[in-house]
Amino acid sequence: MNIYYFSEEISFRLRQKRKISAWLQMVIQQEGYTLIQLNFIFCPDSYLHAKNITYLGHDTLTDVITFNYATDAKTVFGDVYISIERVRENAKIYKRQMAAELYMVMVHGLLHLLSYNDQKPEEKLIIREKEFFYLAQLWPNLALQPSMKATI
């Protein structure tokens, strides 16, 4: 399926890889894209912070950074780096299950590879709606929880 999972400087293993990969593939297809290769790299804050400074010039912590390597339109080829520490912290802050927060961040990173941005308020609203739409396809009951929607 060409979706791969790695960890750097952290001990983390994604559960239900087949189910999650099938869901991500479905998102790609529904958006009209073709998958070339998609890598998820799970790491600690320090690792992602260094990437954020080096490649984006941002001296801040973040939960996800996406690198797009696609050279053809409507193809997905990229890396999605996810800070497990940020995901855990955000799950506590937003009163979500860790898995829900992780899947939300995973689809958020994928949406960036599918040409969605979140720099402007209207872009943030669109990408957030897409996150909930696709999260509901993976986990129908979870996406309907009020605490999830409170962050829109």
Image (cartoon, rainbow, N blue to C red):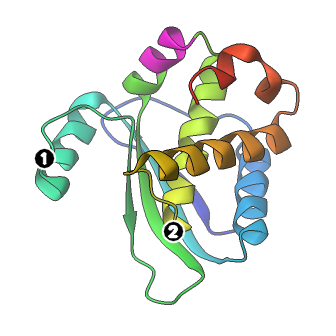
Residue 115: mark: 2
Question: Does the magenta portion include 53?
Answer: no
Q: Are marks 1 and 2 in contact (CB under 8 Å)?
A: no
Work out which quarter of the rendered image holds the C terminus and state it: top right
Where's residue 149, x and y in %?
Answer: 67, 24
Where's residue 5, x and y in %?
Answer: 54, 50
Residue 122: mark: none
Residue at 13% across / 46% down in the picture?
A: 53
Q: Amino acid at mark 1?
A: Ile
Residue 22, placed above or below residue 88: below
Residue at 62% across / 19% down in the picture?
A: 150
Disc 1 packing (10 Å; few <14; some 14–19; many ≥20)? few
Where's residue 51, x and y in %?
Answer: 21, 48
* 113 or 49: nearer the viewer: 113
Residue 147, placed above or below residue 152: above
Is residue 75 left or right of 1 when viewed as pictured? left
Which of the 4 image quadrants contains residue 36?
Answer: bottom right
- Residue bounds of the magenta highlight: 88-94
